Amino acid sequence: MHNLLQGKKGIITGALDEHSIAWKVAETAHREGAQFILTNAPVALRLGKIKELADKTGSDLVPADATSVEDIGKLYDAAQAKFGKVDFILHSIGMSLNVRKGRAYTDLNYEFLAKTYDISSISFHKMMQVAYQRDLMNEWGSIVSLSYIAAQRFFPKYGDMAESKALLESFARSFGYYFGKKAKVRVNTVSQSPTPTTAGQGIAGFDAMLKYGEMMSALGNAPAQACADFIVMLFSDYTRMVTMQNLYHDGGFSNTGLTEDVLNAFQGA
Ligand SMILES: NC(=O)c1ccc[n+]([C@@H]2O[C@H](COP(=O)([O-])OP(=O)(O)OC[C@H]3O[C@@H](n4cnc5c(N)ncnc54)[C@H](O)[C@@H]3O)[C@@H](O)[C@H]2O)c1
């Protein structure tokens, strides 16, 4: 424990169960001295274990569908009543109906596609826009969302989530500019290794992706806890000049062409 977030207040979306990246961020931010409001979609609040996390971290729980500007407004009302302004926001939300229902990339349902973008990317813009217009963020605040390398490179079963992540990363760049100019707030995405969570395991062939990632990364796949540590650092004052970036947190995967492990596997084949 380093008291990295002592005195800081924030909002954490997306904690569903103890496997969620956001769950680990909440535990770590709490350990580092932060106070925050936890939020998730109303259905996740009913089904998930998030109440347990709220009790453990002494946090309020506010339901909000991140695609609803009205719900985001109510969430921020609660944050403003409790904290005044906030120092950090974690957007850790993703879902594709096409992927979930097994629709091939060459046979997308376009209503599902619009919903995928709304949930997985546009919700990030909405959360930033409402925060920006309300002046919710303290100076030198930090906003982070979670991405995946399928934004840059093709991965077969990732479907329309690839474009969602490309859009998400673009929103971070563009809004990062406006938030930086307005209030010295930084906006970044963290491009994380495959991680065994509910969202992750919804992708067909996920176990094979995990194994491939493990073999293709010098440090192995980055675990959820390491991702949480990195995000907490991004919320801290030690990264004040880092903004508009997509930051790879993947054990080296993104800069690897071939590893000895993979080479050996093919030589034996
Ligand atoms: N697991 C991986 O392999 C991996 C890798 C890279 C990036 N990510 C990203 O990390 C983020 C968090 O996912 P996770 O892996 O922790 O899985 P998770 O399933 O634990 O979290 C996803 C969360 O999104 C929430 N959500 C869905 N629709 C919502 C809505 N309309 N409003 C509010 N919340 C909503 C869910 O309730 C859930 O809590 C996602 O953006 C995901 O794409 C995951």
Image: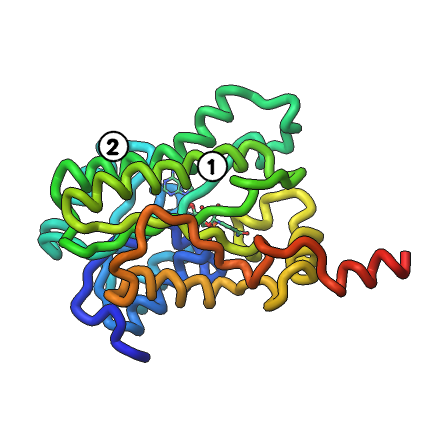
In-image side of 25 versus 108 (left or right) = left
Q: Amino acid at mark 2?
A: Val
Q: Label 1's element?
A: helix
The residue carrying mark 2 is 69
Identity of the residue drawn at 29% across and 32% down: 68
Give the residue displayed 63% in from the left and 28% down from the top: 105
**Left or right relative to 229: residue 211:** right
Label 1: how many Cα within 10 Å (few below 14, some 14–19, many 20+)? some
Residue drawn at (69%, 58%), measured in percent from left and top? 211
* Neighbourhood count class around disc 2 (C-alpha, 10 Å): few under 14, some 14–19, many 20 upward: some
| Foreground tag (1 vs 2) | 1
Tell me which amino acid carries mark 1: Ala
* Rendered-image quadrant of the C terminus: bottom right
Q: Residue under circle 1?
A: 166
Residue 74 at least partly seen? no
Dot 1 and dot 2 residues touching (CB under 8 Å): no
Depth check: 64 or 187 in front? 187
Kindly state the secondary structure of the residue where label 2 is placed. Answer: helix
Q: Position of residue 197 (x, y in %)?
A: 53, 54
Instruction: Please identify the residue farthest to the right as the structure is shown.
Output: 269
Q: CA distance from mark 1 to mark 2?
A: 22 Å
- The residue sitting at 49% across, 62% down in the picture is 224
Instruction: Estimate the x, y position of residue 16 in percent, counting from the top left.
Output: 42, 53
Q: Is residue 118 left or right of residue 141?
A: right
Q: Is 61 placed above or below 5 here? A: above
Residue 59 is left or right of residue 167, and the answer is: left
